[in-house]
Image (tube, rainbow, N blue to C red):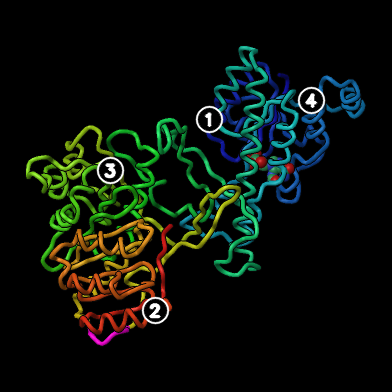
Amino acid sequence: MKRALVSVSDKHNLDKLARRLHDAGVQLISTGGSAKFIEAQSLPVTPVDEVTNFPEMLDGRVKTLHPAIHGGILARRGMPEHVAKLEEHKIDTIDVVVVNLYPFRATVTNPDKTPTWEEAVENIDIGGPAMIRAAAKNHDDVLVVVDPADYDEVCDAIESKSVDANLRRRLAWKAFQHCAAYDASVSEWLWDNAGFAEPNSLPPAAVIPVSQSVPLRYGENPHQPAAFYQDDSLRENAGGGVARAVQHHGKEMSYNNYLDADAAYSCVSDIKEDACVIVKHTNPCGAAVVGANRDLLEAYRCAVRADHISAFGGIVAFNTTVDADLAREIREFRSPEDGETRMFYEIVIAPSYTPEGLEVLKGKSKTLRILEAPPRDAARLSWRQVGGGFLAQSADDVTGDTASFEKAAEATATDEQMTDLRLAWTIVKHVKSNAIAVAKDGRLLGMGSGQPNRVNSVRIALEKAGDEAKGASLASDAFFPFSWNDSVEKACQAGVSVIAHPGGSMRDSDAVECCDKYGVALFTTGVRHFKH
Ligand SMILES: NC(=O)c1ncn([C@@H]2O[C@H](COP(=O)(O)O)[C@@H](O)[C@H]2O)c1NC=O
């Protein structure tokens, strides 16, 4: 290892790297800012323009784009013709390339300053990727280092003269990954900002950079290897949710924990009032909001009581701060089943905890995962994998508070019943289809999820609601294909006072007539909430 070219925007740990390379007898060549930094460590460094015999120009757009650099990187040392060509043009080989790129992503996602178009464009690195790609291609002869986290390992290998093919190829892989993620950000930014694409239109092609942030013990089942990958696209930068959660306590997160925590947090984030939602296997089985006669402690209790059997082992989510009183309640609350067994949960997730609240909650059990997550941003593109491809759609951003409810039958609903209907509508959006949610007094009474026929979902939801269904509001994620002696009539017979569905069935009029017969208020939203 004779010569190293160092050109880095992120100067983190550059002092240590430069010193170790120098001490190992490696000559340092460097671009403007990096050279200055190395010089300031009192280390010898050759400016790149002395190698190229050409000044850096065009405001840094051309610094290293020169045959003296790229020839030195790309020449194959084992090929006599390549070696002869270098000699003919008096070019020296470059054996180590240490480059990281202009901070394009940080520039365009800076929350404090939106860059001008020119500022963003000037942060698109050209010379850096060219060198990274050249060095990565010629990895048999050149070490390419793009991540300061690799400096120590690379220096160790150089010092002990143990640079092997494995290290070279691993670094080359990382280098191309680095460039690919970088280009993905640039193209995403152009699509969103260049003005040629319709707002919210779907791009005809996409590259989504992801990085493994958590290795998981296994996937849905123990025989499936798995990992959690964080979405590094620009749109996700401020997206919040479980990927950005801090885990304060408890056992490591599992694959299913991520799915369930995301489901619970998405649902509770959609509720306007302070609320608690409990999820089991991605479906909300309990929910309640804070109201005139109910504080957050009571909302939590109501959410458990909605279906305490399902809540046991579930995920408890809040859209507001968990304080010490609430934490104590979560820690001590006994199962309504026997009044003795303390409720057990996999996860508690909330946007914040008071310091005391966090300490109290930690005392619940060693295993309880306590997550603090920034609120979930619903206005995203969602992707889903199917065999051979991905389905993309804009996220379902309609909730009970934004949907409009058109009166479709004679009976009217009270303000309270309409509030409950809105809550049921928000919750039903998060329940697997066919989905039915029944709510009263600001709490979920029962839900039916994932049944291949709607009437069974209605039956299950009403069964859970029991006698309390009387006067309740019921939401259906999609229209009722049948009403008489079917979903609508069963709801009416159970005493439900208000029903909402999207409408659009051939037999919508049956639903109206049925509700009129029982004096039940019926509303259509024109919006459907299938969740498959
Ligand atoms: N134009 C070039 O020839 C060129 N060569 C290297 N760079 C970049 O310049 C940056 C380092 O600059 P400096 O050493 O001046 O701080 C690195 O991020 C590197 O990727 C270049 N800049 C951008 O394209």
The answer to which of 191 and 12 lies nearer the viewer is: 191
Dot 1 corresponds to which residue?
149
Is 270 displayed left or right of 190 in the figure? left
**Mark with earlier residue (1, 3):** 1
Is 395 displayed left or right of 422 in the figure? right
Q: Real-space Cα distance between discs 4 and 2?
A: 78 Å
| Corner quadrant of residue 76 | top right
**Magenta segment, prevailing SS (helix, strand or loop):** loop
Is 296 displayed left or right of 153 in the figure? left
Q: Is residue 35 visible?
A: no
Report x, y in % for residue 33: 63, 39
**Mark with earlier residue (4, 2):** 4
Dot 2 corresponds to which residue?
507
Dot 3 corresponds to which residue?
347
Dot 4 corresponds to which residue?
93
| Mark 2 residue type | Arg
- Secondary structure beneath dot 3 equals strand
Q: Real-space Cα distance between discs 1 and 3?
A: 32 Å
Q: How many numbered discs sit on the rendered protein?
A: 4
Q: Residue furthest top?
A: 160
- The crowding category of the residue bearing disc 1, from other C-alpha atoms within 10 Å (few below 14, some 14 to 19, many at least 20), is few
Q: Residue at x 24, y 42 (%)?
A: 313
Disc 3 and disc 4 in contact, CB within 8 angstroms: no
Q: Residue at x 17, y 36 (%)?
A: 363
Report x, y in % for residue 174: 61, 33
Marks 2 and 1: which is nearer the front? Answer: 2
Marks 3 and 4: which is nearer the front? Answer: 3
Magenta stretch bounds: 407-412
| Mark 4 residue type | Thr
